[in-house]
């Protein structure tokens, strides 16, 4: 009978240890999942911001190229007007 009472004492300890260990692993998995979700959100936000910035840079470059073309055309007209006839 002494062995039965010691066995019955050990089973709850194992199940408590198992459930505690399982809970710790589950907490770790949840924490890891939330961390990855947060990192993904940060990266998606940064990508969107950079894409908007790239579009603004493209628009600025296009405007600058048009201004340069207009300036060259204006200078050519100015040179033509200044040449002796």
Image (cartoon, rainbow, N blue to C red):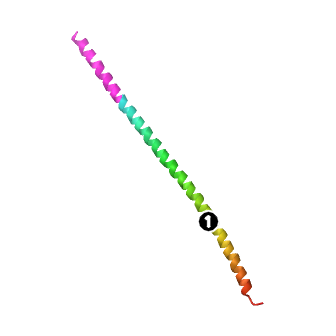
Name the secondary structure under disc 1.
helix
Q: Pointer 1: residues within 10 angstroms few (<14), some, or many (20+)?
A: few
Q: Residue at x 30, y 18 (%)?
A: 11
Image spot of residue 21 (x, y percent) = 34, 29
Quadrant position of the N terminus in the picture: top left
Establish if 48 lies above or below 60.
above
Image spot of residue 65 (x, y percent) = 65, 69
**Left or right, residue 68 beside residue 24:** right
In the rendered image, the residue lying farthest to the bottom is 84
Residue 20, image quadrant: top left
Magenta span: predominant SS is helix
Residue 17 within the magenta-colored segment of the rendering: yes
Residue 69 within the magenta-colored segment of the rendering: no
Image spot of residue 49 (x, y percent) = 53, 54
Residue 56, image quadrant: bottom right
* Front in this rendered view, residue 70 or 19: 70
In the rendered image, the residue lying farthest to the right is 85
The residue identified by callout 1 is: 61
Callout count: 1
Establish if 49 lies above or below 39.
below
Magenta-colored span: 1-21
Quadrant position of the C terminus in the picture: bottom right
Image spot of residue 62 (x, y percent) = 64, 65
Q: Residue at x 33, y 22 (%)?
A: 15
Q: Residue at x 31, y 22 (%)?
A: 14
**Left or right, residue 15 beside residue 74:** left
Residue 29, image quadrant: top left
In the rendered image, the residue lying farthest to the left is 2
Establish if 36 lies above or below 24.
below
Q: Residue at x 53, y 51 (%)?
A: 47
């Amino acid at each position: 009978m002494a062995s039965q009472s010691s066995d019955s004492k050990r089973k709850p300890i194992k199940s408590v240890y198992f459930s505690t260990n399982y809970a710790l692993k589950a907490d770790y998995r949840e924490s890891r999942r939330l961390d990855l979700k947060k990192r993904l959100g940060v990266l998606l936000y940064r990508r969107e911001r950079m894409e908007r910035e790239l579009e603004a840079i493209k628009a600025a470059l296009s405007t600058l190229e048009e201004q340069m073309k207009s300036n060259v055309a204006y200078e050519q007209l100015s040179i033509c007007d200044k040449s002796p006839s």
